[in-house]
Image: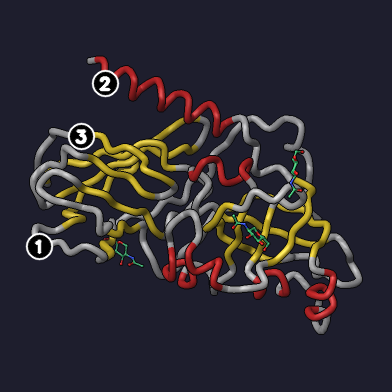
Amino acid sequence: MGGESVFLLSLLFLLLSSATACDRCVHRSKAAYFSSSSSLSVGACGYESVALDFNGGFVAAASSALYREGVGCGACFQIRCKNTKLCSNGGVEVILTDFNKSNSTDFILSSNAFMAMARNGMAQEIKKLGILDVEYKRIPCEYKNHNLSIRVEESSRMPNHLAIKFLYQGGQTDIVAVDVAQVGSASWRFMNRDYGPVWSTTRAPAVPLQFRMVVTGGYDGKWVWAERAVMPAKWRAGSVYDMGVQITDIAQEGCYHCDAEEWK
Ligand SMILES: *[C@@H]1O[C@H](CO)[C@@H](O)[C@H](O)[C@H]1NC(C)=O
Ligand SMILES: *[C@@H]1O[C@H](CO)[C@@H](O)[C@H](O)[C@H]1NC(C)=O
Ligand SMILES: *[C@@H]1O[C@H](CO)[C@@H](O)[C@H](O)[C@H]1NC(C)=O
């Protein structure tokens, strides 16, 4: 019982703390770029080379307010620079894959994403500037060729210890709770967030496994169920398993101060 109420309290806390972010508002900040691409192939969210498959390699490291101790991993943002001579109106769409606690910028973009903010022919100009005034807002992630998926992490030591990483999380939501059960069983066990998109349990049920997640969506949390056998009996560490569902929800926090604000 104790465990359950702690779980519910932390769930409530997570829902409340994500509800205060108002991240679909337009924010003003600065953005820079990574001069070496090696920093992006690692990344605090642990996506490693999979990140290059997310969005044409248009990825970003973000400040702690956006990284949110890893809850922000996989979130999508539209960013444009404010110099209308050099920068296009639409800007660029990036996925958060890393943390960078720079004082002066909210984002450090992959260099291809940074240059993609430019008008035609202006990419080298903005690269020379190196750091730009930008506007940004959180947008829904769209994966046309992927369902929400899990990667079984190498740290998994079945039968007891299971660690998974979520990939290709659509919508504009956070995953705030994850349960796992043997296929056909109603005996769900909750998993804990290790960091970013990685969740684990030391009380894994017997394989094959099904999963259900609570995501922030609408004005509340909602369950997303992957009722199929997502993780087969003959699973392999490092393999990616399709959950057969995708998230398309948009979390609707009350952002009164910006609800009328348009990005023209
Ligand atoms: C943050 O980004 C800067 C600029 O690219 C880089 O020099 C620094 O190493 C990064 N810090 C971390 C913790 O990745
Ligand atoms: C960041 O800000 C803190 C406090 O404002 C300051 O102590 C620190 O030196 C700054 N770091 C950089 C790299 O500017
Ligand atoms: C997503 O899952 C559904 C249901 O299993 C499946 O029909 C569809 O092909 C999957 N989509 C992708 C892009 O794999």
Asked if residue 2 lies left or right of residue 169, the reply is left
Rounded to the nearest angstrom, the CA distance separating label 1 from label 2 is: 31 Å
Of residue 179 and residue 38, the one placed in the foreground of this image is: 38
Decide which of tag 3 and tag 2 comes sooner along the chain.
2
Relative to 249, say whether 223 is above or below: above
Going by the numbered disc 1, the residue's amino acid type is: Lys
Rounded to the nearest angstrom, the CA distance separating label 3 from label 2 is: 11 Å
Residue 189, numbered circle: 3
Q: Going 79% across and 48% down the picture, which residue do you hit?
A: 28
Q: Going 64% across and 30% down the picture, which residue do you hit?
A: 254
Helix, strand or loop under label 1:
loop
User: x, y percentage for residue 73?
Assistant: 50, 51
Going by the numbered disc 2, the residue's amino acid type is: Gly
Of residue 43 and residue 80, the one placed in the foreground of this image is: 43
Asked if residue 107 lies left or right of residue 243, the reply is right
Residue 3, numbered circle: 2
> Which quadrant would residue 4 be assigned to in this image?
top left
Q: Residue furthest bottom?
A: 121
Task: Name the residue tied to disc 1.
Answer: 234
User: x, y percentage for residue 99?
Assistant: 57, 52
What is the total number of numbered labels drawn onto the structure image?
3
Helix, strand or loop under label 2:
helix
